[in-house]
Image (cartoon, rainbow, N blue to C red):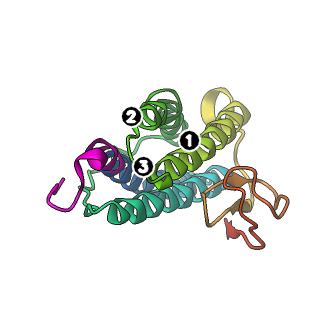
Amino acid sequence: MSSCYVSAKNEVTVSNLLAAFERELNVHARYMAFAARAESECKFEAASLLRAIGRSEKIHADNHARVIRQLGGEPKATIHLVDVNTTGENLTAALEEEDYEIESMYPRFLEENRSLDNSAGRTFTWALEAEKTHARLLTEIIKQMGPGEGSARTVAAREFYVRPVCGYVSRTPEPERCWVCDHFCKTFEVIQ
């Protein structure tokens, strides 16, 4: 982190934002690779879900980057190589990613947020709440696949709806006012 423009009171927050930014970009890349593998295995619903969650992770990274800049930092990230396995293994790995962010990363970052600007707290909270939905959706599809990974085959991709402000993902378009970010979202990004 370049601290020449970041005030001392924001150093921990910006450091955490940078860590979250890099992680979200890497998770986005990982989920896009996982989606391609699911597609190649004709697991179209899993592919759709992974693309939707991947898009959500990119929204989180963009939100973190915006706050990093507001607090005087420069968003930088290294994208790591992705290990891609079977779709069942990839979904389990994705669920582990979400669980880490829900149980450890975002709660710690929220606790350590020392910034007087509540933008960091807001972007951490939005990401945390969206991650909870990601974990629920991943758990559902893992259960649907069952043992042997055979039952999640569908003839067409499924639509998922992603809120462009906070990254909340749902199976259906939900009410105008988002329960995560409290914004009026008249449109969703529809991801298949």
> Three-letter amino acid code at disc 3?
Leu
Q: Is residue 7 magenta?
A: yes
Residue 130 percent across, percent down from the top left = 62, 47
Helix, strand or loop at disc 1? Answer: helix
Residue 125 lies in quadrant: top right
Q: Which residues are magenta?
A: 1-17
Q: Is residue 144 left or right of residue 111?
A: right
Q: Is residue 102 left or right of residue 74?
A: right
- Mark 3 to mark 1 CA distance (whole Å): 20 Å
Residue 85 lies in quadrant: top left
Helix, strand or loop at disc 2? Answer: helix
- For disc 1, the marked residue is 128
- Of pointers 1 and 2, the one earlier in the residue sequence: 2
- For disc 2, the marked residue is 112
**Circle 3/circle 1 CB separation < 8 Å:** no
Badge 1 local density, few (<14 within 10 Å), some, or many (20+)? Answer: many
- Of pointers 3 and 1, the one earlier in the residue sequence: 3
- For disc 3, the marked residue is 116
Single out the mark in the foreground, 1 or 2.
Answer: 2
